[in-house]
Image (cartoon, helix red, strand yellow):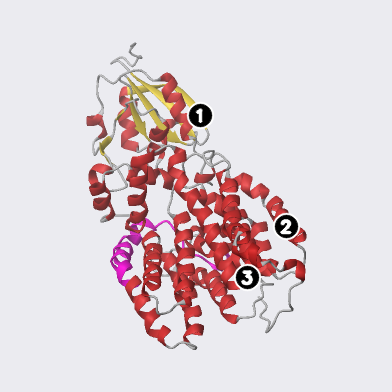
Amino acid sequence: MVITAQLPPPREEFQDSAEERSARGRVALWAAPLLLALLVGGFGLTGPLLGRDELVTWDMVGRDTDRILATLRNVDAVHGTYYLLMHGWVELFGDSVLSLRLPSLFAVAATASVVALLGDRLFGYRAGILAGLLFGLVPAVSRYGHEARSYALVLLAASLATLLLLRALDRPRGLWRWAAYVLALACTGALHLIALSVVLAHAALLVTRARQDRSLWWRSGLALAAAAACVTPLALLGRSQAGRQLYWVAAPDGWALLSLPQELFASAVGAGALAALALTARSERRAPLLMCGTWALVPPALVWAFSHGEVSYFRGVYVLFTLPAWALLAGAGLGAARRSWKAVAAGVAALALLTLPDHRQMRQPFEHNAPVLLDYAAAAEVIERGHRPGDAVVYDRFDTWQLDGGVAYYLPRDLRLRDVFLTRTPAEIDDLYAVQCAVPDRCLREDERRVWLLTEGTDFPFNAIDPEQAGALQRGYTVKASTPVTGMTVSLLERTNAAGGVRQP
């Protein structure tokens, strides 16, 4: 990032007429990035199978409001706001893959518009529209615009809070402008607590402005205190649940921090291109560069540092909200280039082509579970084709997360299978994990002649499940057929008679 005292006046071909700025140009500023993000993000929206986290969303939003709130007291409180919003959405529009993912697509498209408006305020019209377009082309934006989780909404909330702060600074005495900022900031924290670290970027801006207007010290202090008061109860509850939810996240080493950009952008090429453009960002004022630089760099560094205690929080998706800052700096860098619009457009098109392989990867069928590949839909199809009335099912829950939920989602809703070893569902106990039979032999029924066994991997099916469950099944059933699908095996077990032969139906 290069800070210059004064930029040379732009050539006449880059100067917008007042009419363009007030009408067509102003609409294009927010509409062009929005349409691009919708088009890019909407392509292949329903292609990837639901991932394990998305299946948790489906499970949670299918519960009534009281059950959701009761569950949040036990686990996953940090995603509670998203679950409640999606519960209302699903009530209206159903739980198809398209319906579950559309809010995320709309959120990233709206974020592209907000990024453009931010760029216009901070670096000028040209930089703003370029920032919005570059944001829409980042592969990670499509990736999480395709996922039924809160991260796309977090992008929007953090960006909108920043824009509302700039509006509040336009009229520091405007109470409603500060109230809108507090509300957006509280929503950011309610959707994802780590995203509240965007406040550090806001603080960098506020400090520079408070030197000119000392009233901003107490005005901004009150605003930040109000936002903190709103999210403190959630923060305390989330902190108490962190160990249970994030026990599997490893403490990061130095290499993890260096490799974060590729994970954050979902593209090494995209990360390198935007970082290179960001380094050329220019502004007559120091504050915009300071704010965007703080937004882009400080939160990941802090999350890395705090991830060496009892709980690690270091995941690329948790700092996804820093992408708008990178897009803003890249837009400022590209906008400062003394080239024609055609040349700049060619550069944007080149970035789109270079990241095309990454966009294609984001739309692969199993990408939302990567690196674990599980074809829930194919497994459900095997059961649907071979199902007979009275069949039961056993899911591998020994060391596998959401295999049962994935297959159940893709099975027809009217196809009922008794879950043999399931004692209580997660919804019944206000949790994310089921309770299974303590004594598996007692859960088998003589009248269930056929049981479908779904296991992860391609090993002998009885080797993949709990040993006690495997023993109970082997004493009463034999494997009639096994059908491998990607990452899974669907086995049909048939009950044996006392002599060990298969009892004919």
Q: Which residue is mark 2?
A: 345
Mark 2 lies on a secondary structure that is: helix
Residue at 41% from the left image edge and 32% from the top image edge: 454
First reached walking from the N terminus: tag 1 or tag 3 = 3
Q: State which mark lies toward you, 2 or 3.
A: 3
Say above or below: 367 vs 72.
above
Mark 3 lies on a secondary structure that is: loop
Question: Which part of the image, by quadrant, shows the C terminus?
Answer: top left
- In the rendering, at what x and y percent does residue 183 appear? 37, 66
Observer able to see residue 230: yes
Q: Is residue 69 left or right of residue 125?
A: left
Number of residue marks: 3
Question: Which part of the image, by quadrant, shows the N terminus?
Answer: bottom right
Per the rendered image, the range of residues in magenta is: 228-256
Mark 1 lies on a secondary structure that is: strand
Q: Which mark is residue 484?
A: 1
Say above or below: 469 vs 401.
above
Q: Which residue is mark 3?
A: 124
Residue at 31% from the left image edge and 68% from the top image edge: 230
